[in-house]
Image: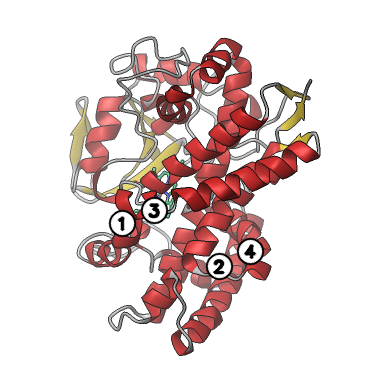
């Protein structure tokens, strides 16, 4: 089977294809997207840290200079939001934006949120148990990180149902070669989300609360676009992958019952188990970078203006780094997985994501000693963002 991110069979089983790529073509040109695929851990890790590449090129060149088409007008609301957040800018703007919010996400700060995260996880799991099960994604995996990040930012309770659909629509643009309908949907979601956040920020500016949006409104050098871009990024990145790690992770445990049993018997394995679940079935399979100055990888010259696609899912199964990489080992001690990225854009929310995952897996293990799979789940069609449509479980016994 070739690398084909639009083929549902490939999306369901990408790892065998990655084996081939790593062995035979650690760097290869992929015609349908015009990108260079990079499949080995050492290369992905090095390129993420290499300042000759960037998440954007607009700080050093125009679209024309990079041989890229002008963006259609209707996409303007999307790019305005995305390019105002730290993820899609490079230093010095990146450094400034990241510094403004990083204090809220230090390991110490987020550790203080643990009791609240635990309480939310226990409440959701109790309600799920009372129903005797159902779709784990809708009942637990989604509401936990959405509630946590919405509370941090100060999004009112009654508006939280808006966040997940906006995020899902905006994320359509992160898939490879999104179609016209997806592009319009994403632009509309970005416009609505930005409008909502502007009016929320205006209210908080007048009457600040004890939340991150209020704090951001008090920073004079942050433009309105940057405030909106930062909040959209935090709200979206703050739940999207965590939802999928929960679903993919439980599905991985059901396919490896010995490891599930091991975890049930020894809860002290939870921290290593969560890292391993993120490695074994990587929630964000690929991240892209623009080549700002010519580079060479394995003797292949990749010129300025090219785009590389870093295959995180492949890097995380590289036998040069991980012993027996296809084996799920919830006790794996040496686990330098790349699921949170590396370099200057390393996931700002990693400490928070870890707490959320440990608390939600822990709450389910405590409350449901006999959780069973009702039916085999199916993957959502996207390749880049890897997640299940639903995960139907029953509380047996
Ligand atoms: C298991 C869950 C998560 C995974 C796998 C994940 C993964 C990632 C990755 C791979 C990147 C870097 C992308 C790149 O280099 O191109 C990133 C960036 C980021 N993530 Fe996460 N993330 C998770 C949860 C979170 C949470 C809970 C937050 C909450 C605030 C968050 C906020 C961010 C932000 C703000 C960035 C941009 C950092 C920058 O550009 O400097 N993430 N994430």
Front position among marks 1 and 3: 3
Q: Which residue is mark 4?
A: 160
- First in sequence: mark 4 vs mark 2: 4
- Residue at 43% over, 24% down: 268
Q: Which residue is mark 2?
A: 190
Distance between the alpha carbons at the discs numbered 2 and 1: 25 Å
| Nearest-to-viewer mark from 4 and 3 | 3
Residue at the spot 22% in from the left edge and 35% down from the top edge: 46
Q: Residues within 10 Å of mark 3 (few under 14, many from 20)?
A: few
- Where disc 3 sits, the SS reads loop
Q: Are marks 1 and 3 in contact (CB under 8 Å)?
A: no
Q: Earlier in the sequence, mark 2 or mark 1?
A: 1
Measured in 3D between alpha carbons, the distance from the residue under mark 2 to the one under mark 3, in whole angstroms, is 32 Å
Closer-to-camera residue (170/338)? 338
Closest to the observer: 178 or 365? 365
Element at label 2: helix
Question: Residue at (78%, 25%) from the top-left corner?
Answer: 374
Nearer the observer: mark 4 or 2; the answer is: 4
Q: Which residue is mark 1?
A: 66
Q: Are marks 4 and 3 in contact (CB under 8 Å)?
A: no
Could you give the CA–CA distance between mark 1 and mark 4, rounded to whole angstroms? 39 Å
Separation (CA) of disc 4 from disc 3: 23 Å
Q: CA distance from mark 1 to mark 3?
A: 45 Å
Q: Quadrant of residue 323?
A: top left
Q: Earlier in the sequence, mark 4 or mark 3?
A: 3
Q: Earlier in the sequence, mark 1 or mark 3?
A: 1
Give the image quarter of residue 89: bottom left
Q: Position of residue 199 (x, y in %)?
A: 55, 83
Q: Are marks 2 and 1 in contact (CB under 8 Å)?
A: no
Near-viewer residue (44 or 375): 375
In screen coordinates, is 64 left or right of 75? left
């Amino acid at each position: 089977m070739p690398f084909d991110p639009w083929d549902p069979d490939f999306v369901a089983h990408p790892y065998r294809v990655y084996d081939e790529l790593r062995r035979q073509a650690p760097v290869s040109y992929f015609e349908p997207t015009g990108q260079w695929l990079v499949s080995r851990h050492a290369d992905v890790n090095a390129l993420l840290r290499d300042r000759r590449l960037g998440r954007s090129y607009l700080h050093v060149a125009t679209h024309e200079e990079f041989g890229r088409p002008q963006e259609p007008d209707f996409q303007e609301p999307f790019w305005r939001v995305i390019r105002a957040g730290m993820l899609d800018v490079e230093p010095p703007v990146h450094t400034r934006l990241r510094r403004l919010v990083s204090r809220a996400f230090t390991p110490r700060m987020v550790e203080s949120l643990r009791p609240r995260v635990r309480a939310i996880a226990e409440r959701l799991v109790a309600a799920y148990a009372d129903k005797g099960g159902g779709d784990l994604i809708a009942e637990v995996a989604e509401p936990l990180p959405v509630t946590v990040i919405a509370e941090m930012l100060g999004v009112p309770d009654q508006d939280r149902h808006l966040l997940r659909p906006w995020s899902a629509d905006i994320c359509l643009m992160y898939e490879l070669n999104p179609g016209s309908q997806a592009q319009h949907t994403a632009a509309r979601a970005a416009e609505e989300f930005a409008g909502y956040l502007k009016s929320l920020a205006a209210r908080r500016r007048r009457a600040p609360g004890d939340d991150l949006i209020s704090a951001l409104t008090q920073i004079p050098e942050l433009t309105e676009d940057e405030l909106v871009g930062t909040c959209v990024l935090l709200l979206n990145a703050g739940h999207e992958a965590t939802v999928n790690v929960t679903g993919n992770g439980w599905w991985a445990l059901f396919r490896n019952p010995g490891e599930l049993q091991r975890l049930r018997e020894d809860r002290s394995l939870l921290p290593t188990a969560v890292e391993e679940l993120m490695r074994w079935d990587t929630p964000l399979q690929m991240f892209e970078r623009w080549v700002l100055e010519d580079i060479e990888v394995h003797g292949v010259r990749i010129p300025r203006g090219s785009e590389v696609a870093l295959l995180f899912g492949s890097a995380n199964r590289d036998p040069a780094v991980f012993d027996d990489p296809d084996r799920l080992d919830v006790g794996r001690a040496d686990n330098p997985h790349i699921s949170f990225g590396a370099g200057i854009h390393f996931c700002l929310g990693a400490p928070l994501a870890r707490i959320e995952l440990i608390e939600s897996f822990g709450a389910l293990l405590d409350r449901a000693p006999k959780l069973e799979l009702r039916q085999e789940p199916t993957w959502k069609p996207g390749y880049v963002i890897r997640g299940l449509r639903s995960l139907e479980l029953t509380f047996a016994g």
